[in-house]
Image: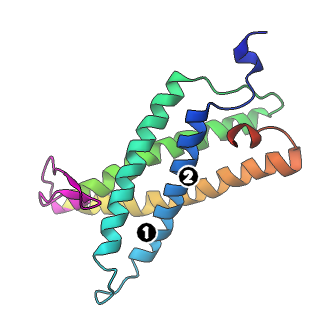
Amino acid sequence: MTSEIKKKSYSLSTKLLHWLIAGHMIGLIVSGWWIVDLSFYSSWYYYAPSLHKSFGAVVFLIGLLLLLNKFRKRPPTLAGHTNLEKLASKFAHFLLFASVLTIPISGYIFTTFTGQNVSIFNTFNIPAVFVTSEKIRDLAIEFHIYASYGIAGVVFVHAGGALKHHFLDKDRTLRRMLW
């Protein structure tokens, strides 16, 4: 047997990137819901969106690293999944990867539509590359909101699927992503 066939877990780099992005995405989903309800008079009114943008940039960067890692390292094989489970897994992972790239880009577009840079943790700026119209800004906002709600559902289903495999099917699906 080759080492690829024997492989039972993801690489350490994949596990680290997966859990970093998972924690950040959950934090961004929760903070996004919180931010939209902030009052102009809240002490968090300006600070919370700034943190949200900074962590969104971190998710984008981690997402790129995870995507590069995905093409560099083959995932472990795991027998026993139905064709429907394999299809659902591929579709969910596609949506998750797409979201960590497109949702931050949409946030960047509507944040920089007037030419204003994006400050990252008040240490450096991501420059505004192009100025867009209000129509493009509004589309980016709509996409950002609806894609965020949608990916929250995918995250929930993804985690639920891993727990189902662990507790009901009693297979290695979840364990191969744990330390």
Q: Position of residue 25 (x, y in %)?
A: 50, 56
Task: Name the element at disc 1.
Answer: helix
Hey, which residue is sitting farthest top in the picture? 1
- Residue visible at 15% across and 58% down in the picture: 133
- Residue visible at 53% across and 46% down in the picture: 96
Q: Position of residue 65 (x, y in %)?
A: 44, 36
Q: Quadrant where the C terminus lies?
A: top right
Res. 63 visible in picture: yes
Tell me if mark 2 has few (under 14), some (14-19) or many (20+) residues whose alpha carbon lies within 10 angstroms of its own: some
> Does 179 sit left or right of 97 as displayed?
right
In this figure, which residue is indicated by the disc labeled 1? 32
Mark 2 vs mark 1, CA separation in Å: 15 Å
Magenta stretch contains residue 133: yes
**What kind of residue is marked 2?**
Ala
Q: Position of residue 24 (x, y in %)?
A: 49, 56
Q: Position of residue 110 (x, y in %)?
A: 25, 60
In this figure, which residue is indicated by the disc labeled 2? 22
Residue 84 picture quarter: top right
Tell me if mark 1 has few (under 14), some (14-19) or many (20+) residues whose alpha carbon lies within 10 angstroms of its own: some
**What kind of residue is marked 1?**
Gly
Res. 143 visible in picture: no
> Does 71 sit left or right of 122 as displayed?
right
What range of the chain is rendered magenta? 110-134
- Residue visible at 47% across and 33% down in the picture: 67
- Residue visible at 44% across and 61% down in the picture: 146
Observer-nearest residue: 135 or 102? 102
